[in-house]
Image (cartoon, rainbow, N blue to C red):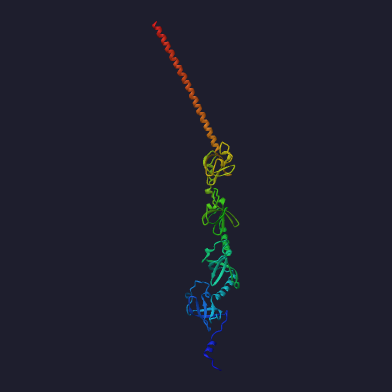
Amino acid sequence: MSELSFEEMLEDSLVTIHNGEVVEGTVIGVKDNEIILNIGYKADGILTKNEYSNNADIDLTAEVKTGDKMTVKVLKVNDGEGQVLLTYKRLQQDKMNKRFEEAFENQEVLTGKVAAVLKGGLSVAYGEGRVFIPASLVSDMYERDLSKYENQEVEFVLTEVNPHKRRIIGNRKQLIVEKKKQMQKELLEKIEVGMMVEGVVKNLTDFGAFVDLGGADGLLHISEMSWGRVDDPKKLFKVGDKVNVMIKDIADSKIALTMKLEENNPWKNAAEKYSVGTLLTGKVARMTDFGAFIELEEGIDALLHVSQISIEHVEKPSDVLKVGQEVTAKVVDFNEETKKISLSIKALEIEKKKEAEAEAEAAEEVEETAQTEETVQAEETTQVEENTEASAEMAETEEVSAEE
């Protein structure tokens, strides 16, 4: 048997490797962009930064040291320069794929960090794997801007795992919906009609505000925001405002709210303040063809019918009144049951006219009396003068007689 040369013995001592094979190696060098490993082959293995991790900012010199043992996968036995190309991240990805499959089968809740906000959703890092959460599955509500999730940790479940197509799809919406259902159940068990609760304005519409009560949303309808008239909820509230509201009604999972409480009900003492015959001042709030509504206070409007605006004929209220104008009128009707108050300016004008006529009559009577007294006094003065003249004549006659 011939003796083997040193080169032949060395060749026999080296392992044979193939593409796709998993091998053990020892780190013999670390550079900024690559790691060099001794894998027991005639050529060293090269593990580039790109094949070590998906994180482009990773510092290889901080990750591994000379002498570290690593398990890697062979990408190419010969890269054309006699070197073996290795991958670490793909081996980890293979392990992650198995982990994802297990999590998918068990519907396990996973937590990962949002690595990138994409046009159609979020790319979430989980270990060395990547999970894509479509925009439609990020939340239970449509969100136009997903940038707030960048670098945030999010929980999700997997709805699709297909490593061959590199499709690992996550679902965050499902967890949010399930959590809200549980919170809603707990909330509905502890609230009841008439209870005061604190909430946060979540959304505003033309017809009201949706208030987050901590487990479920309640609707504060525009008609329940105030005893007064509300034209636009956005003038009263903004999203994020904290509000104290009362549970008005609960129908299955629907919760109706109100801010119209008995203690702030302006009609509580209205019968005393607005009894028939009371003279008051208010502002024109709005007008129709048949009359003007006068705001007496927040929550109480009174009708000034077109026929009661003036003694003179008025075709329509806007001919003589304008919104915001202050008017003084008299209460001519009060109905607490239907919460209706009727006013009249005409009644005041009639009263003023009667008072003026009465004053005129009284003045005329005074003038007539004065004239009568003046006539009597003149007559008396004339009589006195006549008597005086008669007396003088008589005295003169007596004096003549005496001389004779």
Relative height, residue 319 to residue 214 (above, below) = above
Q: Position of residue 253 (x, y in %)?
A: 59, 57
Q: Where residue 332 appears, x then y in whole percent?
A: 56, 39
Q: Residue furthest top?
A: 404
Q: Is residue 366 left or right of residue 142?
A: left
Pick whichever, 196 or 396, lies toward us: 396
Tell me which corner region of the image, top left, top right, bottom left or bottom right, holds residue 276.
Answer: top right
Residue at 54 percent across and 36 percent down: it is 349
Of all residues, the one furthest to the left in this rendering is 403
In the image, farthest residue toward the bottom = 1
54 or 82, nearer to the observer: 82
Residue situated in front as seen by the camera: 402 or 90? 90
Residue found 43% across the figure and 11% down from its top: 393
Position of residue 350 measured from the top left corner of the image (x, y, whole percent): 55, 35
Question: Where is the C terminus found, in terms of image quarters?
Answer: top left
Q: Quadrant of residue 161?
A: bottom right
- Is residue 360 visible in the rendered image? The answer is yes
